[in-house]
Amino acid sequence: MSQAVHRRMDFVVKVSKFCNLRCRYCYEYESLGNREAMSREQLRQLYRHIEAWRAQVDARDQQRTELGFIWHGGEPLLLEPGFYWDTLQDQKEIFGEDVPRKNVLQTNLTVLDEERIELLRRGFDVVGVSVDVFGGLRVNVAGKDLQPQTLKNMERLRERGVPFSTITVLTRANIGRLRHIYDFFSRAGIDFRLLPLFDGAFEGQHRSFDMSTQDILKAFQELVDLWLEKDGFLKVYPTLEQIQTVLRFIKGNAAPVYYNKREWLPVLLVNTNGDCFTYGDPYEDPEWCVGNLFTTPLVDLFAGERFAKSALAAERRIAQNCLSCPYFGACSGYPIAEEHYNFKEKRPDGGRTCVVERNLFAYIEKRIRAQQELLTDERVEAAFREQPAA
Ligand code: SF4
């Protein structure tokens, strides 16, 4: 078997919900005081279940899969660094040296000491820092904005040579400052992903900073404009992925891609108690839990009725939207299958309409066709070749 990696599956590991912040939009808001965490043994069991599945599907398909573990919370850095060193050691033992894998840590970066800097430098492959730049919604229990602390610690990571990228949550509180946000990251040379607000933890949580589908669409359009207008190659997501899709469509020389969740699921969310959810389904709704990875082999979970129900729901959304979409094939259908910000618009039959992605692709296409030289623009070509970030 070739040593090249053919595909990847990510596991978003909600290692603990406990957090020192109370970001006003956090979808885990009601669990942020809960100190419960996954245990070392539960994680070992999770790894064993994943490895048994990986060995089986790689042998079956003659493919090589990279595994991604995205450590998420709460604030994962509140756990002792020793916890992570132990579990990383367990990964080595259970997966061996030959199974490619990446460990990513998503942090608010407000708590950082020498031990944690060392952990981020040597233990993790990628560090993602949550920072909104504007909005003042990332506050602690007392309501104090802790962004200055995060920025200070980002500086410390830079001084110590620990690379990181950032995630910025898009809300009504910062949507009018996109140009400034872009400039901030551009000046600092830091890659970033703009993530539209996820559903709240309770009714009315987002009342003062929620956005409409049109707001999200306009924000993504503005980000495309900013990326095209600025010099230099800043990795801005999902903009690069969206431009890649439209270039595939315009050039028409790539094999079509179709998202099929039954064939390959790219990401599975593992909750603190081991319950698993796919991204397109309602989070923490027991009706949509596809199984528990502490107690159930992943092979069984994928073969189960719950997963079949989840796949069917995604297939329906694709059938209702993508079959009449000109971009289908260049776009795999993943946005309407799994991306929550695409789910906001209900159809009369109760289904969902792909508004953001489809209209954004049309906007990007118009921009590129009106400015043909963009097709030979080195930066745009580089974006086309660039692998999307984790
Ligand atoms: S843009 Fe939306 S409707 Fe079109 S193929 Fe992609 S997911 Fe489907």
Image: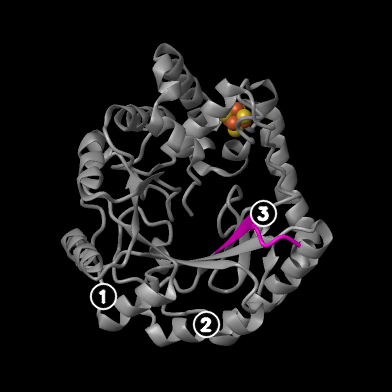
For ligand 1, the image quadrant comes to: top right
Q: Position of residue 389 (x, y in %)?
A: 46, 51
Q: Give the mark, 3 or 1, whose residue is nearer the N terminus.
A: 3
Answer few, some or many: residues within 10 Å of disc 2's Cα (few below 14, many 20 plus, some between 14 and 19): some
* Residue with the mark numbered 2: 87
> Which callout, 3 or 2, points at the residue further toward the start of the chain?
3
Circle 1 — which element?
Answer: loop
Q: Is mark 1 within 8 Å of ligand 1?
A: no
The quarter of the rendered structure image containing the N terminus is bottom right
Q: Is mark 2 within 8 Å of ligand 1?
A: no
**Which residue is under mark 1?**
112
- Secondary structure of the residue carrying numbered label 2: helix
Give amino acid for label 1. Leu
Label 3 belongs to which residue? Answer: 6
Query: Is disc 3 in contact with disc 1, using a CB cutoff of under 8 Å?
Result: no
Hey, which residue is sitting farthest top in the picture?
370
User: Which span is picked out in magenta?
Assistant: 1-11
Q: Rate crowding at label 3 as few (under 14), some (14 to 19) or many (20 or more) other CA atoms within 10 Å.
A: few
> Which residue type carries mark 3?
His
Residue drawn at x 65%, y 30% is 254
Residue drawn at point x = 60 percent, y = 64 percent = 67
Residue count near mark 1 (Cα–Cα under 10 Å), binned few <14, some 14–19, many ≥20 = some
Residue type indicated by callout 2: Thr
Q: Is residue 316 magenta?
A: no
Question: Viewer-proximal residue, 143 or 178?
Answer: 178
Residue 184 location, quadrant = top left
Residue 165 seen from this side: yes
- Measured along the vertical axis of the image, is residue 235 above or below residue 357? below
Q: Nearer the observer, disc 3 or disc 1?
A: 3
